Amino acid sequence: MIWLQKTIEESVSMEGTGLHTGRKTRMTLSPAELNTGLVFLAQGPDGQVEIPALVENVAPREDLVRATTLVKDGVRINTVEHVLAALMGMGVTNCRITLDGNEPPVPGCGSSLSYVNLIEEAGIREQGLPGCYFKINRPFHYSDGTAEISAEPADHFRISFHIDYDDPSIGVQSTTFDIRREIFKKEVAPARTFALLRDVKKLRDMGLGQGGSEHNALIFDNGAIVGGQELRFPDECVRHKVLDLLGDLALLGMPIQGHIKARLSGHAANVDFTRILAKAERKLPRIYPARKPEHWDISSIMEIMPHRFPFLLVDRILKLEPGKRVTGIKNVTINEPFFQGHFPGHPIMPAVIIIEAMAQVGGVLLLSSAEDSRGKLVYFSGIDEARFRQPVVPGDQVRFELELLKLRGPLCKMRGTAWVGDVKVAEAVLLSTVVES
């Protein structure tokens, strides 16, 4: 599994009232550079403070009542989970979130849908570089006597949740969702925050829920919804619990591959569990220091390409513009197996191997654009206009530059050029098909 880092195309803003503080506030989402992560910016006593959305910056457990709060350098930002869920659910890994108050606004319905719409208004841009992710490779379990959360290995990121309320309008609800952009947008993001009427006064006495009402939250009272609102889903409450958990898991600072199962948990338990994951070993695809921030190392390449010795012919990706072009290199040494017979005493890289290496670089471009590249292969279906202008010999470093000319379903057409230094050594137009292995 591989995740390309993503940011938004342009800055966008929204205004509204904070759900718990009840104060008017303005929030701006802005593009961020590679490896930035999700970062909040707010005014502190001595100027603007940056607070990375990481579990290390979460307030103490006793402060996590009906919301998740970040604290740093005298600044508190309340109720971050709905914004973080929207960004994580939409696949955005790098973004700056600037607030002129201390809580994101809740315009409209009290779900993540307004944030999703804002992100789509800004546009999402793939940044062409794999990011770190957390792969669940062994079981984890947490319990505080009431809440239970576990994690187990899985091919995708999946969340299951179970709730049990004594109000008949809620009752027992369970659900499971794969967390992918379209599924999140349609099935999870619209689910609204909710509370029992008998708890609302207690929350307001604690200084919480000051901006909440029947217009931006579901309030249940003995089998009825205050204000007469209708449910968007029969199990809307448990879907919102999935949303909350997703926002709290975003505090791990990276995407997750695994199945998270929760029962009767709230923000305090969610954060406790995220802390457990944060202390475990994280999967770092980029195991070697990058020469430049936009380079892919060999470990990242092997995450997406199925080839292995002696037929993996890409050593590094220098630059990738998703859906457009890619540049990669192959270092040619005398140890290449094909030099044993091509030719003894006169080693020359076979033209067919040059084309294969060119196609593998193009394969990185194609497979990185797939939502899930596992189990997919790139087959040749044609080679046109191939020209071989100079021999490639041991000691050369071949730079392959490929441009995507046409992509229609699984069929694609790319123009590739191979260079050694400033010398063009080969070129071809490649036709290929993405197939299931």
Image (cartoon, rainbow, N blue to C red):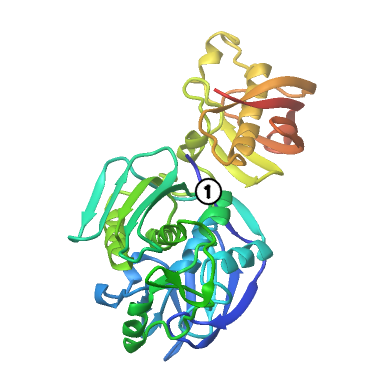
Q: Residue furthest bottom?
A: 45
Q: Residue at x 74, y 39 (%)?
A: 403
Residue that badge 1 annotates: 180
84 or 383: nearer the viewer: 84
Does residue 422 show up?
yes
Q: Residue at x 50, y 85 (%)?
A: 101
Quadrant of the frame with the C terminus: top right
Q: Residue at x 33, y 57 (%)?
A: 163
Residue 346 sits above or below residue 136 on the image: above
Helix or strand or loop: what does disc 1 sit on?
loop
Number of numbered discs on residues: 1
User: Where is residue 235, by image quadrant?
Assistant: bottom left
Residue 365 sits above or below residue 242 on the image: above
Does residue 293 show up?
no
Which amino acid is tagged 1? Answer: Arg
198 or 427: nearer the viewer: 198
Q: What percent of the width, then of the height, locates residue 396? A: 60, 30
